[in-house]
Image: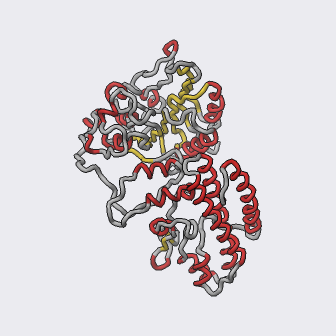
Amino acid sequence: MKLSISRGIPKFVFLSCVFSLICVVLFSKFYSFNPFIILDTKCMYDSNPHVTYNPEIKILETVIKKIEQEIIDIKVSYKNSSHALRYGSFLADILGLIESAKFVENFHDVVGLPERDVNQLYSVQPVHVSQDFFLTEEIRKYVRMKPNRLGKQNFMGANGTFTSIGHACFSMKQELEEYMNYDVGDICNDDWKLAQRLMVHGCDPLPRRRCFSRAPRFYTEPYPIPESIWRLPDDKNVRWSHYRCKGFACLAASKAGKGFFKCADCFNLTHHEMPRWVGPVYLGPTNSTPDLMITEILDLKPGKIRIGLDFSVGTGTFAARMRDHNVTIVSATINLGAPFSEMIALRGLVPIYMTINQRLPFFDNTLDLIHTTRFLDGWIDFVLLDFVLYDWDRVLRPGGLLWIDSFFCLKEDLEDYLEGFKMLRYKRHKWVVVPKVDKDDDREVFFSAVLEKPPRPF
């Protein structure tokens, strides 16, 4: 089906409404179902004589194949179009709904079986995201449910292991299959940049792989602590093939064209990084500053800030400074144009490689502190900011601190962003808004705050 993007999306919206109606009809027959389990219907029909053939399943399978083909066609025809990416993601969402409807029909067909037969059927059937959608065998093997041996529940109460991939992997089929194209037990391709592109665009989590990751050819032992904290690491400890700079000296130099612009001076440990959070770095009109010092924040709750997360773009200096006060900080980062993750690790600190797309991998009410700077700025969508802030609230313990450090945006957007922070209903310890005048105009402002999570329920 050949469509122009400008006309194809409205046409598909109409078609998707038809498909959605099919799903609604199917869903209305049942009280509840599990939308995350998709049975292999062909295998079920062939292997269990009690299951009768349902013509509605055949219709759904035809629809699924057409949508899968459309995703492939749009990927080939409009490879570099942002509209095509949105269109493909929309198709993938519809595909998931229809696959769920397909599961419901399967469930309806087996509910008449004795409980023992149903349990046996569900414990041994392979589970996959979409039948024959991915061509690479490693992806197929990965996404299928891995049933426990002997058909018994494991200590977690599950009959099998359900490995997952990000929903946007459907619209990035070609890239994902390239990523998963390797020889089992061999050395992985040098494709971390492809993996990061998949993650950033929503194909996250990525599937695990059964190959050995590449290491730098001439890796040397990192410098010992405390020397490693404020010394540039050895260039031999990074794979530089996908970076514009080929060494840490290039990254630390004051020059343009290093391949990234966020935190461009973060690798300059002595002049740029060392003064941060021990004294004001940015001074605006009348010596106003959004910079808050670590000591004044820790003095708000003496001895009670022990562990936390830094969700920023940087090389781990915040974690290094907090280490001086016996506070353990995990630094969330990705390698946007430079080896930020390797740099943090080589300094003797803890990086966690993750994107803004991910739910934080911490349990509820566990962290004392979340800090963020120069990352969640005026580019972020208001709804996305809501999801991020609620997730941060989830992992902060009652009495924990949220430190918004030098958030900047356009003046006209400030009130909208501040409403997002106010909806948390946190206690305010610090709340500062100052002009941002490091550019030729005065259209932007800095906002910094330290907020304390209240106990809940109120």
Residue 363, compared with residue 50, is above or below; it is above
Tell me the residue at 25%/40% (across/down). Answer: 234
Tell me the residue at 49%/32% (across/down). Answer: 374
- Position of 90 with respect to 255 (left or right) is right
User: Does residue 455 appear in this view?
Assistant: no
Identify which residue, 244 or 109, lies in the foreground: 244
Q: Position of residue 378 (x, y in %)?
A: 57, 32
Residue 429, compared with residue 124, is above or below; it is above
Tell me the residue at 65%/86% (across/down). Answer: 50
Which residue ends up furthest to the bottom in the rendered image?
49
Q: Position of residue 376 (x, y in %)?
A: 53, 36
Tell me the residue at 65%/57% (across/down). Answer: 2
User: Does residue 169 appear in this view?
Assistant: yes
Q: Look at the image and name its color scheme.
A: secondary structure
Count of marks overlaid on the render: 0
Q: Position of residue 108 (x, y in %)?
A: 70, 75
- Position of 303 with respect to 220 (left or right) is right
